[in-house]
Amino acid sequence: MKFANDLRIKTATSWFPPDHETVEDAIAAGKLDQSDADKIGVTRLPVSTRLSAPEMAVAAARDAISRAGWHPSKVGLVLHTWIYHQGHDMWSPPHFVANEVGTPEALAYGVYQGCNGAALSLHLAAMHLASDPGLGGALITTGDRFEPPGFRRWSCDYGLGYGDAGTAVLLHRADGEPDDFALVSLATTTAGELELMLRHGDDFSPAPLAHNEYISLRRPKKSYMAEHGKEQFGEIASRMIRRVIVDSVHDAGLELDDPRIKYIVLPRIGVAPLDAIYAPVLEDVLKAEALRFHADTGHLGCGDFLANLADLRDHALLQPGDVALVIGGGAAWTWTCAVVQVPAAGV
């Protein structure tokens, strides 16, 4: 989807807790072995010992609003997304975020789309801005805290370690003031048949954690692979990743070899899945440098996408006019690729 020329990402922020657990500590504690650690490829994971998931989202949102120099009243839409427990049952964390950042009258709702939730929220926010001339700005937040007993951050999934964080993005129409990026285009594709991968071998249950005392994505994935094989998922994922890259670049009015495309930022999943699924596609279709920002954070759930925008701004060498791609994916299953460009001053 091609967006209007004036759509801007005002700023992107990440909030990480000060505490962490190193991979050496996790191995010593028997939470994973060296082989699994090598597949994850991180040095440590951020661990929140104090703030809940939505409180971390609020911390990131406050930082974003402060960085933007906005009064909270400019925010008329709040979209919050997550993949794990938000601290209360039958409760609305989006309204908590809106109230805590000083926008209690903003339209607030949750977007649940697995680890691709932030990318889809960005798309929804862009559609709101396109259809509502009175909307000043939109706030998108994520927040997750992967704590036991219900979650084992080092061993829940194959090739992933889960880190705690809150992230935020402010989206608005250009007003002549500085912005981090112009949001040029965004493409999403879906493989709904893969939803079976996260429930294979299990009946529908009457309550959370009925199948296991903690969330295990390995168990249904192992059952799925035993029946369908690993090749099927790899083939579908590779095809979908290729599609969103090609579609987003073409929607932006660019060619895949355009020299303005400097980087593509990859999801914060482990080195094993990145090398096996993403790297071959990128080598085939794109000349841009691939950036990986996962080493000190691990996978942030749906926080990957917004945290990658913040790190792209802070750690990549980009000049006005330069273009980057940010790609994300989530079970079960969507993939999204956004094309962003560094705007010239006053544009």
Image (tube, helix red, strand yellow):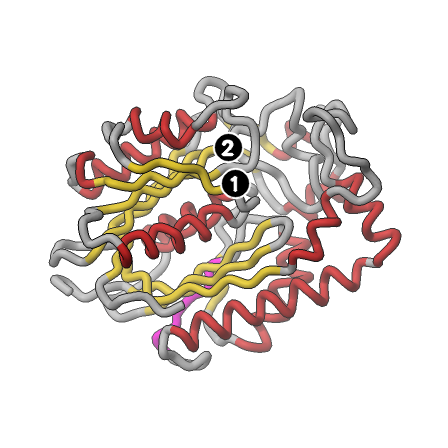
Report the magenta residues as a range: 259-265
> How far across and down, in percent of the image, does residue 146 sit?
58, 29
Q: Front-most of 258 and 40?
A: 258
> How far across and down, in percent of the image, does residue 120 sit?
46, 52
Q: Front-most of 290 and 108?
A: 108
Q: How many marks?
A: 2
Q: Does 90 sit left or right of 71 as displayed? A: right
Is 127 in the magenta?
no
| Three-letter code, disc 1 | Leu
Which residue has dot 1 on it? Answer: 300
Which residue has dot 2 on it? Answer: 144
Give the crowd class for mark 2: few <14, some 14-19, many >=20 residues within 10 Å.
many
Magenta segment main secondary structure: strand
Q: Residue at x 18, y 35 (%)?
A: 73
Which secondary structure lies at badge 1?
loop
Q: Which numbered tag is attached to residue 104?
A: none
| Three-letter code, disc 2 | Asp
Circles 1, 2 touching at the beta carbon (< 8 Å)? yes
| Of pointers 1 and 2, the one earlier in the residue sequence | 2
Q: Does 180 sit left or right of 125 as displayed? A: left
Q: Is residue 158 above or below residue 323?
A: above
Is 260 in the magenta?
yes
> How far across and down, in percent of the image, does residue 131 sit?
28, 56
Camera-nearest label, 1 or 2: 2
Q: Is residue 163 above or below residue 233?
A: above
Quarter of the image for residue 240 reads bottom right
